[in-house]
Amino acid sequence: MNTQIKTLTVKLSDAEIARNAKLEYVRDLRDAGHPALHFRFAKNRARGSWYLLNKRQWHRIGAFPDLNTKQVIAALPAVRLRVAADGAASVSGWLTVGELLDWFGDRMAKSRALSDKRRAAIKSAISCQLKPRLDDLLISDVNAQALDRLLMWPVQAELSLSYVQQLFRLLAMAFRQARKLDLIPVNPMAELKFSNFTSARIQPKPARLRDVQVPELVTLLAERFDSAPGDAMLALMMLCHGTRIGETRQARWADVALPEREWFLPAEHTKSKTELRVPLTDQVCALLRRYRDRQTAQSYTGAFLFPSRRGKPLSDNQASAVFTRLGQGAWTSHDLRKVARTAWTDLGVDGHIGEMLLNHSLGKIASTYINTQAKEQRRLALVKWHDWLDARGFKAIHAQTGVRYEDSQNLVDALNGGACEPEPQFVKGEVCKCVGECCK
């Protein structure tokens, strides 16, 4: 046997690599079926590197056994294209879409930029929809036909078109991120669009609450305010201000300033990641006082408007359960935002003011040229809205006694002059003069 041979031409496989690892004089293995594919042993002959020889230049593909033979051969067409395009050849250790999704799911689970709700939604979409359908699909085989056959067309028969679009966007995001980090040689979804798979238009969900139903809704909340004040108050705050469920459930008494008549929502609590300052009307101030009294009567002196039993605000699931109890499947928390926004338009509220109340993004151009919080306009819009609600039963809940905006500070001063009244303990700007545990 010629022990001087350094390169052997073989049919490459993991087993063939293991056999030749015992032959110290063999440095390289070349694949008989793909002559440009070479394997070079490392000093530790249990390991090695994959190379593509192109125009007398060696392009490293990756390491063995991180990349096994099947993975490298499967990725070889994409590697050749990449070398031809930019001279780069390295690939990740992924062979299938499932492996890429595992990486992306783990990455999203650790992202601090995402809310718990968003992380949970991504985890569910990957584990329940994408992986069961695409787990074994080779990355090199990803194309419009494969995605249409395995994912898009079967899913649209079972799920809403809007959710199918979300799945497509999530999958595209995973491939885009992997390509940005140089973990895959090419992005097979780079040229694909959702419209490639369907021409149907995604229609917005119809509103399940209309203005004519508001009196019935207010009557329900009035009844629940007596039996379950926390449930009713969560819905009332959303109805009165059009805030989101995630923003509202985390409300703190320290962020409610009755003297300044403002409810502050910090950026970390909002979907848009921008803070929101909500004007408080006479009706809502009275409602907050009544609700604070109810909490105090039930021996709660904590920091949150909507506390859980663990001393924290309601979780997302707990808040959603509130609306399951209230709506009984007929309407959801988001329908409160919809009915409020619709009513604002009917009441003549300016469109930009309505969007600002909802804390929607005004768009790049509007954000550039409209540099105002329009606090007074937003307050007047809410005054008009709450007066409209009063005419439909809201007044019976907040029990407004006729104290108006100009007199509110006098009421606060009168309360602060007492021994240790319940309300000042929990509302920013109202000073409690006791020294016990209640103010902590």
Image (cartoon, rainbow, N blue to C red):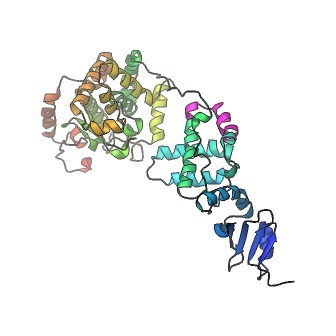
**Chief secondary structure of the magenta span?**
helix
How far from the left and from the top, in percent, is residue 183?
Answer: 58, 58
How far from the left and from the top, in percent, is residue 318?
Answer: 46, 39
Q: Residue at x 48, y 40 (%)?
A: 317
Q: Is residue 214 above or below residue 95?
A: above
Q: Residue at x 74, y 75 (%)?
A: 28
Task: Determine whether, in the image, residue 244 is placed left or right of residue 349.
Answer: right
Toward the front, the furthest residue is 55
Residue bounds of the magenta highlight:
147-163
- Magenta-colored stretch includes residue 279: no
Q: Nearer the viewer, residue 289 or 252?
A: 252
Q: Nearer the viewer, residue 98 or 224?
A: 98
Task: Determine whether, in the image, residue 220 is placed left or right of residue 420.
Answer: right
How far from the left and from the top, in percent, is residue 192?
Answer: 59, 41
How far from the left and from the top, in percent, is residue 60?
Answer: 64, 68
Task: Determine whether, in the image, residue 335 is placed left or right of residue 389.
Answer: right
Q: Is residue 387 visible?
A: yes
Q: Is residue 181 above or below residue 278?
A: below
Q: Nearer the viewer, residue 118 or 224?
A: 118
